[in-house]
Image: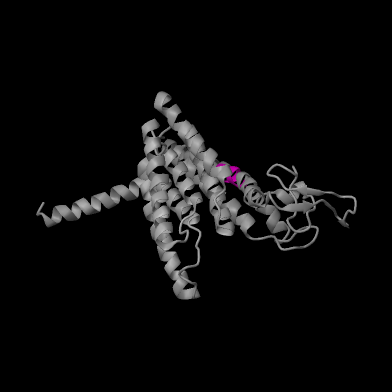
Amino acid sequence: MKTFDIFFNLNYMTLEIIAYQLIYIFFGLLVGSFLNVCIYRIPAAREEFYEESPYGRDPNSKKIDLKFLYPRHSICPSCKNKLLFWHNIPLLSWLLLKGKCAFCSTKISVRYPVVELLTAILSVLSFSNFGLSLTGLIIFAFSAALLVIAFIDYDYYIIPNVISLPGTGICFGLAVINQFCGIFDSPIVPGISDSLWGILIGGGFLWIVAEFYLRVRKIEGLGMGDVKLLAMTGALLGAPGAFYTIFIGSVFGSIIGIGLIIFTKRSASQHIPFGPYLVVATLIYIFSGNELIQAWVGLVTGNMGAENGF
């Protein structure tokens, strides 16, 4: 009987884990669909669009500004037609439509399902590592914001203030709550001073580097958007997270930048968006940074011990 009970409990636990993972994936896909809207609309909010009928431009239509929440319905970026509900089913609609608009047959970028899949992965990582908790929810929301920043910076070489500035304030507010209530777990900072040091070191260090580069080379090497992104990261993850993000992000940026110069004949003076590398480094820190740091420290101390005969 004991063997049967153990086998039954294992199967039950396995099914429960699979069920939770499916919920995380589904939730991530839904949020990913919304993130696609953010990636498209935040930088395009200043561009002017026309309302058009399915049969062409309505001569009576008026010029409108695309806002984050207006129009309320999803539209095709090419023909501006209102999408039907089944056109917005995450991942599945792109497959059913064979990557084309149902109205004008314009190709829909593969980026849309990629963003949805990446968000699903972030959802699984967030809730699997930190549980169905406030910490897990905050980490997922923070990761989703970073994903939007990465794609916008890749496209437009900008990190929108509408994300980084409120994000820094919200993250600092979480540190204040944690200071007095202690309801959030690591890697979220435990208190106010940790958050302030993270903001100072993250944003301040990168600002000094940017100013130094500007004064020496007389050209802008780092944008203020990167500084604000590091301030937001430091506000939530503290000084260790800021240091890790700067170091690993710089390594990634250098390796890929050198590779682009060598293999694509890209000019060394040509700008490369730094935001995506910072985002990747931040996500690595969130989901495995502590383990990597501990492993590195153990390796270094172990080697030092061996050299000293211990």
Q: For this rendering, which residue is in front, 288 or 152? A: 152
Q: Hey, which residue is sitting farthest left in the picture?
A: 309
**The residue positioned farthest toward the top in the image shown:** 180
In the displayed structure image, the side of residue 241 where residue 41 appears, left or right: right
Task: Residue 218: name its quadrant.
Answer: bottom left
The answer to whether residue 15 of the structure is visible from this angle is no
- On screen, 259 above or below 161? below
Question: Residue at horizontal 48%, vertical 51%?
Answer: 226
Specify the segment rendered in magenta: 24-29
Q: How many marks?
A: 0
Between 184 and 168, the residue placed more toward the observer is 168
Q: Residue 78: x, y in percent? A: 75, 59
Q: Main secondary structure of the magenta part?
A: helix
Position of the N terminus, as image quadrant, is top left
**Colouring chosen for the image of the structure:** one colour
Identified at 50% across, 35% down, the residue is 169
Q: Is residue 243 magenta?
A: no
Residue 65, given in percent of the width and then of the height, sits at 74, 47
**In terms of depth relative to the viewer, which is nearer, 164 or 305?**
164
**Position in image of residue 303 (x %, y %):** 18, 56
Q: Closest to the observer: 230 or 191?
A: 230
